[in-house]
Image (cartoon, coloured by chain):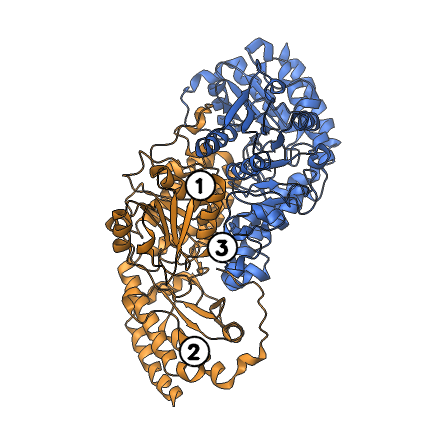
Chain colours: A blue, B orange
């Protein structure tokens, strides 16, 4: 009887929690009572320190010091200061990451910058499993510039077969549906050997697993601040550009804060010689405060420790659901191999949407991705093994009782 | 003796304050003690309601409801809802304004969209007195697309002489240095008669004077939320696109939230048929909360009332400084004619930078714009006539005593 097996795993959860070196960080987050939140891969939980930082920005910096805060509170350098703090989580050097705008806007910047470095190779390569905005942005650039070919890798047409003459390759590092991730160093090397530049979208990687952009010799990267980085809804995203490219790179969103001397108010744009060339307009200061509060927590641990717990969490969840999954049509849609699985586990089921509705109604918050993916994100900073066990047990009950049949199948707007 | 004349104006300030129909709104803002803040044209003051809205967003929407808030708290429609509220201040119809990204990024969108509507007229026209980011963005587009001519109007080469074959004209409505503003309807008509499309940058107009985009038949507009709109540092900016253009328009920042059905996760971008086509990435939700608190205040008055007081404030400041300006080399750099002066007054002086430092040291906060402009912004929602008088009297004392000579002349990073 599968549920007996699952019951046995509860003791394992207790042992794992007792040995969890990150357990002390959980109290740094506000976690709503009565919920098991397994959607931190879509929107990270609220760091308790965010409120204090935000109120200080609001009351003192804005309210009292007003315009002077651009200098005295470091508002001008916020994108760079926060960028450097993110950079330390993804294997970048100081001065190679800047936090600003949205992931989509940043894709535009780095793809255009990369194309300019490969002007005779007007071929973009991406893959069908990317988060759609990556491909949409490539299509927008193609429609704007014309004379660009977009090749999309699929299971039948793997990346390696599409690189002939390619100029720019854009890949999501961790697949947002399955959680499978690319070997960053190997793929980058292959792409560069074919003469193209490699751009990584780290939306589901930053804060989820060990990323070494320097070691992988990546050409560019982008990512977002509101998933595993816990920066809050629509937190500033980021751009990575290594120092070796900075002297040569030009990106087309040439707003005044990317100028080498913004306050000279000269008539001709001249880009900053460093990472600030990726800045464009005025940064949304209030949105940085929450992200900074989250980074305060990140600096109390290491990505190695986070990744180690992440692997334990996802492996344990798979073990729990494995106990009954085959009896109820749940098919693992994530890799079993720890070495290529990110910090999420997905299961496919034809009634996935209704099953997720049933889970959420019982306080187990994952999300659904069309056409049939139940997606569960595991955030080592605040997820416990007991929660993993209880989520699996709730799913078991919903499947055994068929309780999901109470829920309608209409989509009402889930999120990334 | 000029200072005697200025003393007489103090009684006029009292009378003007007594008759001020907007005086009751001043208490809706946090204003730092000991300061006279005349820089709301660069960063608006903090609305007292911002803290409550922000804490509700932080604690309840993010902290408690987490990912569900994209639907339940209306995060998805925030750019449109806030856009409509801004639209009512600038003569737009509902569904024609969306609040998002920065002004610079929005310029990129609308200029590219306009060019696509005039594909055979690859000539941009702007003017030298624009805020530089406008021209920088045009240069970035030219460098990206190639084969585009940029013509810059100056005093010697007026706009009307540059329109032959022009496709897109981008003008800042209110000059950021002098505060002089264009006749929006007349300029738009002239530009359109020449076959070009007219884009207005409303950075120093929205919330400062009566703008009627519909009446002027403008083609596009952009603007920012952090100046007269008081939305906080780096508040969401906005795009205006009239309904007549919406079915035909394409902009190149084709992120997933501009897609007609973002959650279908299809591989091909298809733009929303309305104003949402100007959306790109995930909006910075925390930054909207403060802007919404400010819009709550705007909805307690009318732009007519705001403009009427604005004219009184600037006229009164000019009258006060006129009493002694000629004796100290201060030259009015703003129009005397109320009908073409925005909500700021600028004076030029070769030692303007040091004079502004002296003013700020005494709590009178204006700003300096190279090479020699002392700039004072007047925000009718929270500026009193007594403050105007005291600012002028402080400037008088600094000029009469030569106290500004105590301050060094080095720039240390002023702001827009």
- 1 vs 3, front mark: 1
Element type at mark 3: loop
Q: What's the CA distance linking mark 1 and mark 3?
A: 37 Å
Name the one closer to the observer, A360 or A96: A96
- Label 1 or label 2, whichever comes before in sequence order: 1
Q: Which mark is residue B147?
A: 1
- Do the residues indicated by labels 3 and 2 lie within the same chain of the protein? yes
In this figure, which residue is indicated by the disc labeled 3? B233
Q: What's the CA distance linking mark 1 and mark 2?
A: 45 Å
Q: Chain of mark 2?
A: B
Above/below status of B181 relative to B165:
below
Q: Chain of mark 3?
A: B
- 3 vs 2, front mark: 2
Where residue A158 sits, quadrant-wise, is top right
In this figure, which residue is indicated by the disc labeled 2? B330
Above/below status of B328 relative to A388:
below
Mark 1 surroundings within 10 Å by alpha-carbon count, few (fewer than 14), some (14 through 19), many (20 or more): few
């Amino acid at each position: 009887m599968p549920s007996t097996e699952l019951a046995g795993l509860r003791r394992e959860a207790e042992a794992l929690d007792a040995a969890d070196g990150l357990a002390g960080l959980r109290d740094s987050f506000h976690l709503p009572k009565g919920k098991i939140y397994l959607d931190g891969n879509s929107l990270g939980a609220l760091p308790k320190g965010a409120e204090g930082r935000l109120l200080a920005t609001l009351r003192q910096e804005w309210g009292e010091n007003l315009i002077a805060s651009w200098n005295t509170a470091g508002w001008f350098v916020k994108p760079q200061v926060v960028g450097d703090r993110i950079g330390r989580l993804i294997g970048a050097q100081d001065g190679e990451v800047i936090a600003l705008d949205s992931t989509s806007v940043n894709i535009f910047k780095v793809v255009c910058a990369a194309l300019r470095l490969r002007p005779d190779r007007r071929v973009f390569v991406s893959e069908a499993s990317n988060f759609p905005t990556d491909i949409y942005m490539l299509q927008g650039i193609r429609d704007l510039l014309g004379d660009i070919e977009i090749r999309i890798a699929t299971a039948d047409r793997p990346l390696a077969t599409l690189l002939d003459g390619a100029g720019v390759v854009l890949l999501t590092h961790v697949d947002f549906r399955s959680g499978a991730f690319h070997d960053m160093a190997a793929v980058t090397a292959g792409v560069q050997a074919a003469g193209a530049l490699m751009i990584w979208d780290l939306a589901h990687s930053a804060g989820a697993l060990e990323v070494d952009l320097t070691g992988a010799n990546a050409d560019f990267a982008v990512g977002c601040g509101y998933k595993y980085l816990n920066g809050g809804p629509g937190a500033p995203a980021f751009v990575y550009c290594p120092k070796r490219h900075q002297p040569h790179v030009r990106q087309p969103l040439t707003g005044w804060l990317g100028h080498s001397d913004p306050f000279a108010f000269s008539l001709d744009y001249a880009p900053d010689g460093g990472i600030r060339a990726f800045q464009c307009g005025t940064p949304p200061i209030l949105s940085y405060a929450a992200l900074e509060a989250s980074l305060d927590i990140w600096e109390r641990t290491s990505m190695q420790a986070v990744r180690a717990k992440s692997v334990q969490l996802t492996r344990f969840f798979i073990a729990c659901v494995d106990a009954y999954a085959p009896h109820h049509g749940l098919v693992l849609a994530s890799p079993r191999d720890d070495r290529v699985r990110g910090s999420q586990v997905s299961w496919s089921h034809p009634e996935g949407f209704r099953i997720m509705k049933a889970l959420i109604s019982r306080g187990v918050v994952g999300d659904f991705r069309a056409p049939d993916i139940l997606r569960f994100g595991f955030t080592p900073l605040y997820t416990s093994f007991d929660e993993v066990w209880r989520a699996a047990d709730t799913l078991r009950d919903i499947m055994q009782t068929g309780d999901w049949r109470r829920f309608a199948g209409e989509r009402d707007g889930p999120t990334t």
